[in-house]
Each structure stands twice: as structure tokens, then as C-alpha cells.
Image (cartoon, rainbow, N blue to C red):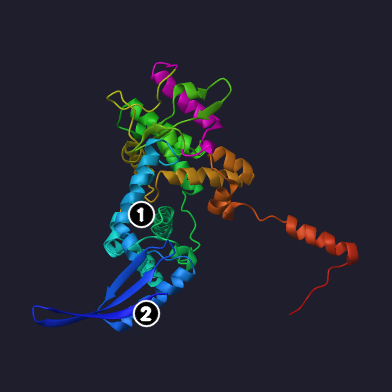
């Protein structure tokens, strides 16, 4: 049990006092904390006793601040990146941005044991004011990861985010914005008409290949960027997706084994790949998208140098002249077109390289046609016990 005692002393002729909490934790270590007011000491004593009883107590002297544990967490992420343990440099950079910009400025100096549920709720509410919904979800995830890491290092005994169900605001149901059929037609027309470009043939072919591979194959930007001629099987009409180019990590394997896949080459893709292959001198190996200096194009060049000029030429801009869609929107358009053609969720997942079908359904579930099998089965069960009426009754309400 914890005890509260008053301590008095004289310093330079002035009488002073403080309230001391003394207790022994479950590890047998004697602890003490000091407070100016008895009310604060009594409240802390009750909390300590409850935590010790629930085996969730960590002494303040045995813990560190949120910033310190966040630094350790990022260091561990960087270690995992170096040994290729399921995390890339882009992910580490995103974690660091969330932590430094949105968390440490609010609770960085606070000791882990002093972080309260209300403090975390205020932090998440602040995220919601400054960020878009999807970004808030990611920030909350990162916050939870930091606290889980603290638990793994015995700096905390429980994750308040989870115990108190502190979460991001519910999604608003907004759908992913994708180019319409008419906008896609304009894009394809722009990249197919050489007269519309006042640029060299290589740049035009790169733009045309980028649009075709994104819309007709559903490839990610990094996957298109890292395509090699040896991964394209013209004879069998297949693309072997094996690599991805990241702004931070360079050319690497896809982030999941599902990203390594085979994608069919359709006629629009075949036409541009053959033209680009011929223009490049019919190479047997090497990257498709090489810069004018002979090196591999950077991922940022895809967006700024290829995609945005094409989108502007096709009129895919808002009233302020800003391009309405990200390059990744073409991948979403590809999926919506595949679903419209009747491709099943499992086959969509396989073609676009999702790690599991739940991701496919979470992102694109609203695009799949409504399944009537539940209704049909329910009616079949009812028909076993009740004869179907010759004429359906009209119910008036």
C-alpha cells in the first residue's frame, strides 16, 4: 500500500513543506513521489494503488517522455528498414512526419505515465481539424504503434488508445474520385495524337505508355517506373510485375508478395510498348522509362513531367487550373472498369496486387454489383414451408 506523509524543513530561514508518497512496486523496488498539495498526493496515491492492483503500474522514475519513446520507435523502424523487415524508407519518413509535426509539439515533453485518455482525445480531435479523414486514420495508427512500442519496452503497461477506444472520426462515406469514361477517352486521345505535342518522340511515348499501363493494367506509379524489358513477354502477351521504384528506397521488391504478379497485355498497351521498344532500339533488357541523361526516371518526374502535362492537355483541371486527379487515380479508374466488366473481387485483387481481398472490398466494394444470392437463398428457405402464391399480393401501406 502507498502512504502519504508530510515533510517539513527550513531553507534559508524559510519554512517549507511537501507531501511524499512512498510505496513498493510489484518488482520490490521502493518508490517515492513528491507533491506540493495533499489533495494531489492523495489522488496520485489512489491511482498508484489501483494500477498496482491491476498490474499496470509503471513508476514515473522508470519511464520516459513521449518524444524519447518516439525517437526509439523511429530508430527501431529504421533498423527494420535496413534489414528489409517489412518496412520501407517512405513509410519511416511518413511515420516521422506524423510524429514530429503533429504529436511531439503537443505531448512530446509529457511522460508516458502522465498521458491521460483525455489528452489523447484532444490530440486526435486536433488531427481532425488539421487533416483529411484518411490522413487522420493514418496518424491515429502511428500514435497507437508508438504506444505499443512503449509497452514492448516495458515503459508502459497498457495502450490507452485501445483501452479507452480512442479512434479517428468515422469515415464520411466519400468515394474515390476517378476520371469519367469521357475524361479517359480524352486522355487516350491526347496521348495518341502526335500533332498535339511539341516535344520529342521519346517523351510522347513515355506519356502514352504511362497512361496505358495505368488504365489498362492498373499498375502503380512505382511499378510502371521500375518496369524492365525482360519482364515483358510479348510472345505470351504478359507483363511480369516484379519491382517498384520508390522516391526514398529506389528500385526494390513490391511491399507485399501479392505485388509480384502477372498482368495481361491488351491491344492498347501492346501497341505503345512495341512502338517504344522499337524507338529504344529493340533492347532485350533495361528499364522502359529512362531519363534523357541515361538513368532511371525518378518517381516525381512521372507526376510532374509526364502525368500533369497530359492531364492539362486533356482538360482534367478544376476552375483554378489545378489538375483534378492524382496519377494514382488512373489505377482506381482501371479497377472500376474491370468491375464494370464483371470481374470478381478475387480476380480484381489478384490483378492489381492487393495483399488480401478485404483491402479490395474496403476500397472498391461499393463498385461491385449488389449480390442477389442472399435474397434468393432466403426465398428458397421460405418456399420449403410455404407454397408460392400464384399471384404476388400487392401490399398497400
Q: Which residue is mark 1?
A: 318
User: Which region is colored magenta?
Assistant: 255-284
Q: State the residue in front, 319 or 51.
A: 51
Whether residue 149 sits left or right of residue 96 in the image: it is right
Q: Which residue is mark 2?
A: 43
The earlier-in-sequence mark between 2 and 1 is: 2
Q: Residue at x 31, y 25 (%)?
A: 295
Above or below, 205 against 1 in this view is: above
Residue 194: tell me if it is visible: no
Residue 108 pos. (x, y %): 29, 61
Do the CB atoms of the residues marked 2 and 1 lie less than 8 Å apart?
no
Q: Residue at x 45, y 67 (%)?
A: 166
Whether residue 391 sits left or right of residue 118 in the image: it is right
Residue 79 pos. (x, y %): 36, 40
Label 2's element? helix
Q: State the residue in front, 235 or 297.
A: 297
Residue 256 pos. (x, y %): 50, 39
In the rendered image, which quarter contains the C terminus?
bottom right
Where, by quadrant of the figure, is residue 5 drawn? bottom left
Q: Is residue 225 magenta?
A: no
Using the numbered discs, state the Cα–Cα distance from disc 2 to disc 1 in whole angstroms: 57 Å
Q: State the residue in front, 140 or 316.
A: 140
Above or below, 293 against 67 in this view is: above
Q: State the residue in front, 89 or 210.
A: 89
Whether residue 340 sits left or right of residue 24 in the image: it is right
Whether residue 283 sits left or right of residue 216 in the image: it is left
Res 114 label = none
Nearer the camera: disc 2 or disc 1: 2
Above or below, 162 against 309 in this view is: below
Q: Residue at x 37, y 45 (%)?
A: 76
**Within 10 angstroms of label 2, few (less than 14), some, or many (20 or more) residues?**
few
Label 1's element? loop
Amino acid at each position: 500500500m502507498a502512504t502519504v506523509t508530510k515533510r517539513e524543513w527550513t531553507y534559508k530561514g524559510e519554512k517549507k513543506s511537501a507531501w511524499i508518497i512512498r510505496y513498493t512496486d510489484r518488482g520490490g523496488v521502493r518508490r517515492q513521489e513528491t507533491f506540493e498539495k495533499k489533495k494531489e498526493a492523495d489522488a496520485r496515491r489512489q491511482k498508484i494503488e489501483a494500477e498496482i492492483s491491476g498490474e499496470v503500474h509503471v513508476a514515473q522514475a522508470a519511464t520516459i517522455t513521449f518524444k524519447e519513446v518516439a525517437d526509439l520507435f523511429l530508430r527501431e523502424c529504421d533498423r527494420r528498414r535496413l534489414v528489409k523487415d517489412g518496412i520501407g524508407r517512405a513509410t519511416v519518413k511518413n511515420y516521422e512526419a506524423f510524429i514530429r509535426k503533429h504529436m511531439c509539439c503537443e505531448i512530446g515533453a509529457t511522460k508516458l505515465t502522465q498521458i491521460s485518455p483525455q489528452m489523447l482525445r484532444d490530440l486526435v480531435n486536433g488531427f481532425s481539424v488539421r487533416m483529411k479523414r484518411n490522413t487522420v486514420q493514418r496518424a491515429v495508427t502511428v500514435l497507437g504503434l508508438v504506444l505499443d512500442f512503449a509497452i514492448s519496452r516495458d515503459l508502459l503497461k497498457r495502450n490507452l488508445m485501445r483501452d479507452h477506444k480512442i479512434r479517428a472520426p468515422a469515415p464520411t462515406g466519400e468515394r474515390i474520385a476517378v476520371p469519367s469514361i469521357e475524361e479517359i477517352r480524352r486522355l487516350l486521345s491526347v496521348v495518341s495524337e502526335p500533332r498535339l505535342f511539341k516535344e520529342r518522340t521519346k517523351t510522347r511515348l513515355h506519356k502514352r505508355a504511362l497512361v496505358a499501363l495505368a488504365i489498362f493494367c492498373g499498375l502503380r506509379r512505382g511499378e510502371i517506373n521500375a518496369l524492365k524489358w525482360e519482364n515483358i513477354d510479348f510472345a505470351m502477351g504478359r507483363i511480369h510485375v516484379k519491382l517498384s521504384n520508390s522516391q526514398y528506397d529506389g528500385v526494390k521488391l513490391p511491399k507485399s508478395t501479392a505485388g509480384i504478379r502477372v498482368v495481361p497485355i491488351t491491344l492498347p498497351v501492346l501497341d505503345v510498348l512495341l512502338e517504344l521498344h522499337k524507338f529504344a532500339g529493340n533492347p532485350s533488357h533495361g528499364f522502359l522509362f529512362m531519363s534523357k541523361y541515361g538513368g532511371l526516371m525518378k518517381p516525381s518526374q512521372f507526376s510532374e513531367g509526364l502525368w500533369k502535362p497530359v492531364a492539362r492537355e486533356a482538360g482534367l483541371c478544376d476552375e483554378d487550373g489545378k489538375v483534378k486527379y492524382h496519377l494514382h487515380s488512373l489505377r482506381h479508374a482501371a479497377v472500376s472498369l474491370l468491375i464494370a466488366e464483371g470481374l470478381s473481387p478475387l480476380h480484381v485483387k489478384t490483378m492489381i496486387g492487393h495483399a488480401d481481398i478485404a483491402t479490395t472490398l474496403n476500397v472498391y466494394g461499393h463498385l461491385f454489383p449488389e449480390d442477389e444470392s442472399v435474397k434468393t437463398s432466403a426465398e428458397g428457405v421460405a418456399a420449403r414451408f410455404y407454397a408460392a402464391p400464384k399471384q404476388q399480393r400487392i401490399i398497400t401501406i
